[in-house]
Amino acid sequence: MASGPPVPPDVEEIKTAVNTALGRQPGTVLFTNARIVNVITGNIQDGPVLLAGRLIAGLGDAVRGATAREVVDLGGRWLAPGLIDGHVHLESSLITPGEYARAVVPRGVTGVVCDPHEIGNVSGVDGIRWFLRASDRLPLDVWIGVPSCVPSSPLETSGARLGLAEIASFLDEPRVVGVAEIMDFPGVLAAREEVLRKALLAETSRKVACGHAPLVRGQALHAYLAAGIRSDHETTEVEEGLEKLRAGCFLMIREGSISRNLSALATLVVSRHMDRIGFVTDDRLPNDLLEEGGVDVLVRRAIRQNVDPVLALRCATWNTARHFALSRRGAIAPGYLADLVVLDDLQEFRAGAVYKDGRLVADGGRLRADLPLPAAAGDAVRNTVHLPRLSAASFRLPAGPGQVRCVKLVPSQLLTELVWITPRTVGSEIVADPNRDIAKLACVERHGRRGTVGVGLVTGFGLRNGALASTVAHDHHNLMAVGATDDDILVASRRLAEMGGGFVVAAGGQVLADLPLPIAGLMSDLRLAEVRARLDRLDEAARSLGVRIPSPFMILSFLGLAVIPELRLTDLGLVDVMAGRLVPLGA
């Protein structure tokens, strides 16, 4: 089964659909007694739906009395278009694209727009090419936005660099729909030519330039959108969302594992904005993927917050398809591809059966379609952890006079705050202070380039002992660690090097739990359930060390992302994001 859009309908398929619609030949499938969710007109209509292969031939009164090789009586159940996630990083689910499809297709998700900049920042062009191969021939459409921020800023060391030529080389790929989130908003506002040319590349290729504009408002917002950027998924407040909608921005409302913005923004999902909002997940961890689902979770939660069910569905189908010019997708209409979900319950968006390209691919919550063998990955994707020579001294902070900067976590958000603290010192060194919930934060360059180590302080983890470390660190994906002792940070870091990347919890000089992620230090080749089980053991080990926040490894992974306010840490040091520069620990 092809992943698309690789192959638009050919003339023979279209001829068959025309003849089937006119009753000259039988259809392949006829759904009867359906309650059709029409996301184009915003209503539900009763009637049949007739398929001709992978196309919808017709519906309603126009095909009453039609015949087909297979008749499926829906008995009054709802028939909706398959969902499309408008912005997701599959790598953040820690599994291969095929395993991701196994998780979301039975829930009614038939398409995703991915930004593979995680693997792009580690393995560059080779990583993106691997991702394209690994996401091909799935029972899930996987479209690609070419990563625009490899690296995401000049204040970090990534494993690769994608310049204008490399981005342009992907834009003719049939599954590429645009240039992915342009995260370097300080670069846009500074009118740096290379950043502006990335947005222009999308426009000249008749594709979409996607945005990333956290807390960007007023004059700065208009300047950002003036570059030709057309969307944003970083909005967290209603007034911010209204301002972006009024400025012509396509607003992507996100419900990830950490950043959960739907409850704050659901009141924006009303008829006057009905064509300007899409639903996205951005980053979802295995436990959330298994328990809550993919973009289907936004549809369910929006309906629970009194959003009209058809409008909620529209935000996860038709709107996203039109924004990215995904031909023949996102609705139930003649000539559209038959990506369909049979719903046992519209309010809960509970999928009973899922059809992809007119064929049954999932029912009863299980995938029925075969998955291709995983794409082979070479050294550029498998052998990616190259740490400098480390010792406990690598993580020491010399003491100085006065207060120092500290990263403060913001609950349920990707944002952080800068707080000034008086640190605990021992001799001439700043050390962690578990009694005040202050831990060491470290970032180690792991691509074998500079061998640099950034060290700072963080509050909000609750860590009282030991250390957590990870090679998942947006977007440079260097090694990130949080620890109560330098020795345990060292133990965890060395274990990551042995595994080829992943997650580690260590304490007392011992490894308590780990999860190897051998594909670029980002993904496992295990089944989702096994990845989730090992992640649960990691979370349990973290809790035994005092950590009380949910998804601590996901939170740790974002503390190096130097394009989301306010204070971050990369291998080059502390970053004041809004100022766009490195800052010292002290004043």
Image (cartoon, rainbow, N blue to C red):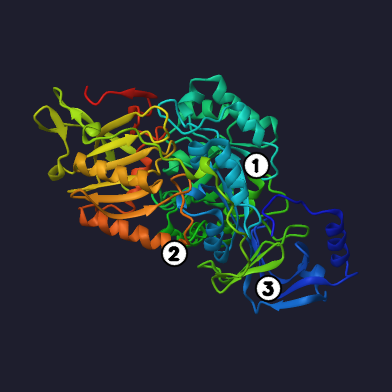
Residue marked by disc 2: 529
- Amino acid type at circle 3 is Ala
Is there a contact, CB below 8 Å, between mark 1 and mark 2?
Answer: no
Q: From the viewer's perspective, is 407 left or right of 1? A: left
Q: Which circle marks residue 177 in the picture?
A: 1
Q: CA distance from mark 1 to mark 2?
A: 31 Å
Residue ranking furthest to the right: 24
Q: Residues within 10 Å of mark 2 (few under 14, many from 20)?
A: some
Q: Nearer the viewer, residue 403 or 446?
A: 446
547, above or below 173, in the image: below
Q: Position of residue 504 (x, y in %)?
A: 31, 50
**Image depth: mark 3 or mark 1 in front:** 1
At horizontal 34% and vertical 33% (from top left) the residue drawn is 388
Disc 1 residue type (three-letter): Val
- Above or below, 286 against 276 in this view is below
Q: In the image, is residue 529 above or below residue 259?
A: below
